[in-house]
Amino acid sequence: MEQEQALVEAILFLEVEPIEVRTLARITGLSREQVENILDGIRSDCAATNRGLELITTAGSVRFSPKKELWPRLRERFGRKREGRLSRAAMETLSIVAYSQPITRSEIESLRGVTADTMIRQLLDRGMIREMGKKDAPGRPIQYGTTREFLEHFGLQSIADLPRLEEIDQERFSLDG
């Protein structure tokens, strides 16, 4: 079981966002119960040793995170890190917002098929999207759209400069003779 635990730890390390337990089971070929047992072991190891990480579980998804007591020192040393590349999931969420704005969190989640809270928060923190108002629908959900920073980042004058989806599909599936 040590190799399986090492594999699960490596997957958690490589994932940018939380990963569902059932996805871990599928990727590793282990049963959900085996994965849960491995996660319990990892959680215990992190708590019992002087590791700087802990295993966080939220809504059936798990991820490594710095231990809570380290956050003040990390913030002091690194501040808010905004630079760096966007993850594939963040780019996917950003493209959905760009092409469908204004759009609500639930509409994004419907298109992506997974929760979007983390990606929306990251994109808001980086200034790539902003709250545009509230939808005239039950619950008055927040609608999101892109920002000037988004346009600058991608070298666009306006949102109209985005390639049309039809053009992207043609380029993606064309053969280079």
Image: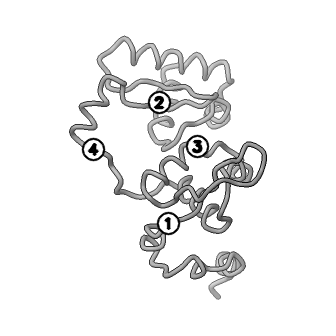
The residue pinned by badge 3 equals: 117
Q: Residue at x 54, y 48 (%)?
A: 119
Viewer-nearest of discs 4 and 1: 1
Q: Are marks 3 and 4 in contact (CB under 8 Å)?
A: no
Name the residue type under label 3: Asp
Q: Percent x, y for residue 166?
A: 72, 79
Viewer-nearest of discs 1 and 3: 1
Q: Residue at x 66, y 53 (%)?
A: 134
Name the residue type under label 4: Gly
The residue pinned by badge 4 equals: 79
Which dot marks residue 9?
Answer: 2
Q: Percent x, y for residue 154?
A: 46, 73
Disc 1, SS: loop
Q: CA distance from mark 2 to mark 3?
A: 24 Å
Q: CA distance from mark 1 to mark 2?
A: 37 Å
Disc 2, SS: helix
